[in-house]
Image: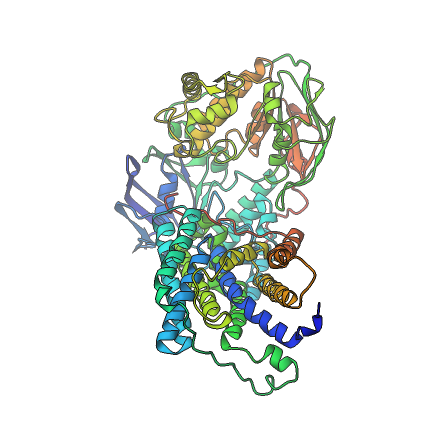
Amino acid sequence: MDLGSINPVLLVASIMVSATPILLAAIGEMVVEKAGVLNLGVEGMMITGAVVGFAVAVTSGNPYFGFLAAAAASAVLSLSFGVLTQFLLSNQVATGLGLTLVGLGLSSLIGKPYEGMKAPPISKVHIPGLSDMPVFGKMLFSHDVMIYVSLLLVVAVWAFLKYTRAGLILRAVGESHDSAHALGYKVVTVRLMAIFFGGACAGLGGAYLSLVRVPQWTEGMTAGAGWIALAIVVFASWRAGRVLIGAYLFGGVTVLQLNLQAAGANVPVALLSASPYLITIIVLVFISARGAHGAPGSLGRSFHASH
Amino acid sequence: MSDILLGIQGLTKAYPGVVANDDVSFDIQKGEIHALLGENGAGKSTLVKMIYGLVAPDKGAMTLDGQSFSPSKPSEARQNGVAMVFQHFSLFDALNVAENVALGMENPPPMRDLARRIREVSELYGLPLDPSRTVGTLSAGERQRVEIIRCLLQNPRLLIMDEPTSVLTPQEVEILFETLMQLKSEGTSILYISHKLEEIRAICDHATILRLGKKVGESTPSEASAKELAELMVGNSFAAPVARDVEKGAVLLEAKSLSLPAPGAFGTPLREVSFAVRAGEVLGIGGVAGNGQDELLAALSGERTSDGGTVLLKGNDISSDGPVARRDMGLLSAPEERLGHAAAPDMSLTENGVLTASRRESLVKNGLIDWRKAQGFTEAVIERFDVRTPGPDTAARALSGGNLQKYVVGREIHQNPEVLIVNQPTWGVDAAAAAAIRQALLDLAAKGAAIVVISQDLDELMEISDRFAALNEGRLSPAHPVADLNMEKIGLMMGGAHDMEVAHVHG
């Protein structure tokens, strides 16, 4: 095999592109779970975001309209999950699985006319100074704006949960909804807002797939990315920094194994294809085995103010 | 200008099928400690929830310091100077003390200032507390301090305390009372809810007694006896357990240097626990919550197995046997947590009965459940322990806490065990029902069973135990005959003495 054919600059750059959809979806889902809600519909919301984002971007010619529309569409879709689980107290697991099925079906319906089309290109950000640096400039500082948005989002979520009062209330609601209610906090409102945010993030992640990473629309194109995002949240022990590590690890191994396949590595292709899933899970299991797991105390439990 | 802080006139609140409060009126004076007395289901909680803005009354009015007062949510009550310490602490285990306090405040200062103020106030009132500790690692007494300090930081005019001493050591109770007296001297009014009549007699200036949602009396507790108060509350006199003199038989249950690691991040390890209980004997195990009570019950019931030779039943090593094998041998247990541990909340009482009694009462034949027999067993328990429920098909969740407690403890007693281990057998049960449960335990002992009662209610332990031992951080003190003990010795056995200091404000 010929490892020389792998260009490290391009490798790192494509790892970032590969990791971003999962990172966006996972950071949103982390906020949802921190509020005590388990939304298994990430996959459905991602693919809805992918198709709506693609359709709007193609129609308007502007990829940023696509991202906005994707976030809005997935957030609205997630609200259906919110209404069902928060007001009608339906089972969160079943409703989340239903949301995934709805999203997959809806997206192939909407996406039919757009198959085979090409997404409008998204421009790279040029940061004076940084982007002109040798090696690193091209590796880290010559990407589209959404990659930086996703990284800023991780920092923002971390700071929000750690330092703000609203973040404290959100964690409290996820930790013990009965106690939060007794103190007079609006459990259902907080959870709906978290679900809405999680939906918007998943939508952005999906749109990044169809507008940047691939970039075209094919049916079922998320191919399990939503489930990986869910797993990353759990194994990252609900911490923003670890979600970032997990997403980049998964993205990294995905790109690396593609490069290895292309370079003709003497490893069965099936094993290489499975490696991102295996390695991500193994590494995160080791991370989470070390410390406290920190699952929010009320995760997945329905709240009703009658008690 | 009157001295009435909170006036309550004709408060009424009905829920479907039950009137929780019916035309209740009373006044709380400024700077008084006012007791609210009543059995389970007498409507105390509903009344307090209306004052705190969690529930809106159907009828009636309240005045606070002469102004009309009708809080629509707790934050409004807090803004008006009404603060509340809940019975089931409204705390968040995974958050630290300062974060928990911040959640209970309207406009909390930045975290660093808040931590400093928590230290100041906690020292001022003799309630030492570290703002950066995670609440999940605190003892019940320390958790209550978090609640109290959360209230005190907002300079309340009225402090509501719901069953505050149920989880405290005698020394901690003393500290709490000093704090309450100090608050009273500063002009704060306190609404004090408790089952413990002696406490109410000790510190309350005035008492309002509720029964079945109605106010049935008023009293000056220091001038009434505990028995008089209890009769007002219950409506008829109840029997205290009869002392008995039973010949003690052979050792039935023995623990020898029983050690187990902590089951989870917030658990307590058991350290070299040793004791022996004879037939006909009741061993009382006291201690502040979170010192290994749940872990000890799990190790004795068989939920967690231990090293060989550490748990012996009638001389046989049962350390590696699970709960079913131990039940077959005559060792039964009733854990503390009613919903989720002692009973499956959404299953009926009959189904819950089958879960523990199927083998001893042979409720299962050829692998099929004999529902008629199971129902008979359940009805017998309901009848014998006066469980108030529409019937055996009612879901466990639908029973009030006290009634479910009667059922889960009664279910084990009714199976005539040779050894019975119970944790908090009368927690949240009203005085009359608690007396009935204790009497049933004593009757069982009189028939030759060995009984281990783990409880945080020291009065209860003193009443029914032959010998007493205390758990502290997973260690069990040697057991002493109850006749040789006084409250002070017990407090020292419980080991809560090291971080205690009496309130020392104003010099």
The single residue placed furthest to the left in the displayed view is: B59
Quadrant location of the N terminus of chain A? bottom right
Whether B147 is drawn above or below B459: the answer is: below
In front of the other: B135 or B497: B135
The reply, left or right, for residue B423 in relation to residue B373 is right
The reply, left or right, for residue B331 in relation to residue B166 is right
In front of the other: A250 or B183: A250
The reply, left or right, for residue A213 in relation to residue B49 is right
In front of the other: B248 or B304: B304
Q: Position of residue B28 (x, y in %)?
A: 37, 46
Q: Position of residue A146 (x, y in %)?
A: 49, 74
Q: Position of residue A225 (x, y in %)?
A: 51, 60
Whether A244 is drawn above or below B166: the answer is: below
The reply, left or right, for residue B121 in relation to residue B468 is left
Looking at the rendering, which quadrant does residue B270 occupy? top right
Q: Residue at x 64, y 46 (%)?
A: B500
Quadrant location of the C terminus of chain A? top left
Q: Position of residue B94 (x, y in %)?
A: 56, 52
Whether A110 is drawn above or below B434: the answer is: below
